[in-house]
Amino acid sequence: MNFFFGFKFNSIQCRLTIPKFKNREKISGRLCLYSASVSENEEWIIKKVIDEEDEDFFYVNNKNIENKNIYFISNDKNPNEGSYKEIKNYNNFSKTIPAFRCNIMLFNSNGGYSSYQGEYPYNMITKNGSFLSSAYVLTNINALKNFLLLRNIFYLPTTENFKLYLLDINKRKIIHDFNLKVNYSNTLKIENDMINENYYFFSKKFIGIPNYLSIDKNDHFSFEHTLPPQSAIIGKNRFNVIKSLKEKINKIII
């Protein structure tokens, strides 16, 4: 089962396009679109989303996008609307090969926009762990603005804060640290002095999907996510290489 999310901040708006079909199956007529968010009482509140749809897609328009919300599709009777102590794997409809994804589009009122196909798999939300992402690969030092848009989803209904570090892995020092929130679409403005080929974002407690948005002076958008760092390494030892790097980074933080 896959989850979907949006980002909304400043003048940036968002729209999700979620398919009702799979590559090898007919459209199911019993699918519903749901949202889930953590309440002040630390419970998951699950609701059916009433928004635009057609024969092929559900749409979540900007008015229904909230940074605390996640979205998923399931049949019309599972789950029931209400409060829950954890998010469960309600169905296998979106468990597909290739991955079942939605279109995440960011845009502004001046006509700038960009999108990519994204998802957050259920097997990621049940895990704690660390993540590592280059602050250099998808940013643009010549852009007017750069942002890190980090989405975390954890299956328990918590909104606790966690630390995100910007580190220089060559000089082995912390450049900045930031407070972010679990089960939230976090937004961080990346200043030009934070764009360096030796700089990496690192969190030691929670994993997440790091997305990068660049906007130039003509309102042209570039919006994409980074893959796990081991995907850029060829060879049997690629996981050990990243494990060793994370251990070195942990020592810098300590």
Image (cartoon, rainbow, N blue to C red):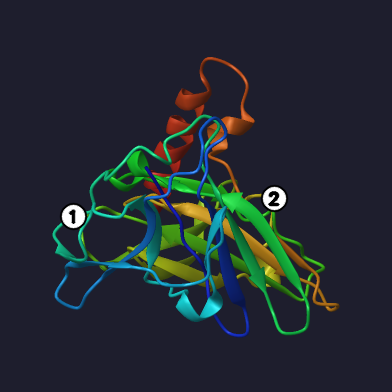
Of badges 2 and 1, nearer the viewer stands: 1
Would residue 41 be seen by someone viewing this image from the given angle?
yes
Residue at point 62% right, 78% down? 12
Tag 1 residue: 86
Tag 2 residue: 137
Say which of 170 and 214 sits in front. Answer: 214
Say which of 224 and 100 sits in front. Answer: 100
Total marks placed: 2
* Three-letter code for the amino acid on which mark 2 is drawn: Val
Residue at point 37% right, 57% down? 32
Residue at point 63% right, 60% down? 212
Where does residue 134 sit, x and y in percent of width and height? 60, 50
Furthest residue toward top:
236
* Three-letter code for the amino acid on which mark 1 is drawn: Glu
- The mark nearer the N terminus, 2 or 1, is 1
Mark 1 and mark 2 in contact (Cβ < 8 Å)? no
Would residue 224 be seen by someone viewing this image from the given angle?
no
Q: SS of the residue at dot 1? A: loop
Horizontal side, residue 147 vs residue 38: left or right: right
Q: SS of the residue at dot 2? A: loop
Horizontal side, residue 67 vs residue 86: left or right: right
Please tell me in which quadrant of the rendered image residue 17 appears. Answer: bottom right
Residue at point 66% right, 65% down? 213
Q: Quadrant of the N terminus?
A: top left
Where does residue 131 sit, x and y in percent of width and height? 44, 46
Say which of 220 and 129 sits in front. Answer: 220
